[in-house]
Image (cartoon, rainbow, N blue to C red):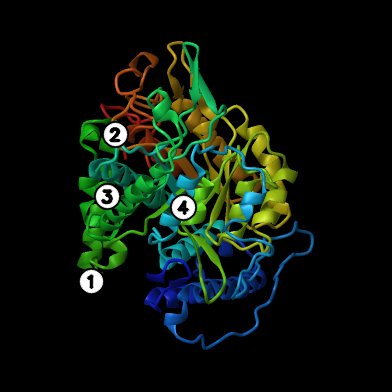
Amino acid sequence: ALFSDPTKAIHQPRTQADSRVLKGPTTHSQGLRVMPRRQRSRVRAALAPGLLAVVVGLRGPSAGPVRHRTPLPHRVTPTPRGAPPALSMVAMQPERVVAQWSPSSWRKFRVYQDVEYPNERELERVERELEACAPLVFAGEVRTLQESLAKATLGDGFVLMGGDCAESFDEFSVNNVRDTFRVLLQMALTMTYGGGQPIVKIGRMAGQFAKPRSSTTETRDGVTLPAYRGDNINAEPFDAMSRAPDPERMLRAYNQCAQTLNILRAFAVGGYSDISRLHAWNLDFMERTTEGSMYRSLAWKIDESLRFMRAIGIDTTASTLTQTPFYTAHECLLLPYEQALTRQDSTTGRWYDCSAHMLWVGERTRQPGGAHFEFVRGISNPLGVKISDKATPRDVLDIIDALNPQNTPGRLALITRMGAENIREKLPPIVRAVRDAGKAALFISDPVHGNTFKTDSGYKTRSYDAIKEELIGFFDVHAKLGTHAGGVHLEMTGQDVTECIGGDVGRVAVDDLNQRYFTHCDPRLNGRQALALAFEMAESMRERQGLPRLVNPNASGPKSPYIL
């Protein structure tokens, strides 16, 4: 996909992928399988034209005339007698023009987590420079992600989001990007094989710089300075010059994002993701660990399957086995940066924030009537909204109505962060309300943010055991209510850090935190902890489907309790 004029239009030539989109979701998706036959056909009829509209809206003038523009139904709402309202499917219109919205309309609203730059003229100069830069993501990628998220909303897929709490300028390197990418590959492979569902891989990368803060200032030894807000805003050293917000940092962040995306695209399609290389994805520091052994055992099973496929004549060099779709997402926080990278499709009038494939608004900025809410309601990217234990069912329904008024699958994800002690009490009323209202929302668990605490020695950390407990609770709630547990959102890294305590094996103790505590913001799971969680999620998926356990909890031996 090429952007011939970044300030006006997105051009996407017709490809084979477009033909696949026109078909809509497969007839074997779990979300459709569980519906009655008549309801299933009506849902397909509504969803397929909607995906067609996504393609039409992204093709641009270079793709030639659109041959078929049959008027689409506005709403199909199958509601079997005696049952709660089913998921309503709304066909997307060829044009999605949001009334009384523009990329700059957020400036009329209250900006939560606002950044006060000392030099407004310098800020405006940087914004103009960013507006002239090339977009970071492309039309075809956004379209494909929305299609995958739509299927996951219907029950055919699971979202894996992971990456750094906050990216930094100093720690940027090809090796660090590669290591996080390959842990995500390992996790996705484990869950795909174990859970039998396609995994949508999204990195908290190439844009996750800015972080919300509970206070705009920080005081040390009687000296008060602006709080550190992320490398794209100010610097971490505690002095007046470093802590002053500097708009030039947005340009540096943009350049690092472009490099990161280049690296990720090369790894995703350049051979590194070839499934025949799955043994090479093990990180060096995990080679002799229990989690590494679990992964190697799984890899040998997949190797045997690949050999069988080749023996019966199946081409294992096809792109589905040698490449992987990979997307990026970050919190929509620094609005001048997001506005500067927003582009309009001149054919459909749609606006896209081209800084990432997907964006989310956090717990501190998701207030209806606030500037961040105003900005994201007008862009056509898939959106996420963080939902804490403080949110009520009415709050969540209002958010869905505001951000996804057409009830389009793949448009909105609800990312719940409630804490291990609250998940089983606070989540069910929200899931029940969304289900009974027939809302198309994808539920994703963020089990890390609600389980953060400070140790007596002053380290900010998280308990692996609490993170796992919240994840298990998330799956249990959806199983009980007959809804789909649709994804997980983790702060993690491929580095061998000691930032989160606990673990099923190789536990990190509180006294170990000072060994490799490298984070610039919040504590992250290391590769061993993240992969162990992937096995836990695979087991939850298998239990939901009535399949035997992937690992044997009663086994004995040096690799116990994980014997495949």
Q: CA distance from mark 4 to mark 3?
A: 52 Å
Dot 4 or dot 3, earlier in sequence:
4
**Residue picked out by circle 3:** 301
Dot 2 or dot 1, earlier in sequence:
1
Dot 2 or dot 4, earlier in sequence:
4
Dot 3 or dot 2, earlier in sequence:
3
Callouts 3 and 1 close, C-beta under 8 Å: no
What crowding class fits label 2: few (fewer than 14 Cα within 10 Å), some (14-19), or many (20 or more)? many
Q: What residue is shown at x 45% (from left), y 85% (from top)? A: 64
Q: Amino acid at mark 3?
A: Lys
Q: Is residue 95 above or below residue 466?
A: below
Residue 127 - label? 4
**Residue picked out by circle 2:** 495
> Quadrant location of residue 327?
bottom left
Residue 435 - label? none
Residue 546: tell me if it is visible: no
Q: Nearer the viewer, residue 544 or 107?
A: 107
Of the 4 image quadrants, the one containing the C terminus is top left
Q: Amino acid at mark 4?
A: Glu
346 sits to left or right of 305? right
Determine whether the residue tagged by mark 3 lies in a helix, strand or loop.
helix
Residue 315: tell me if it is visible: yes
**Residue picked out by circle 1:** 313
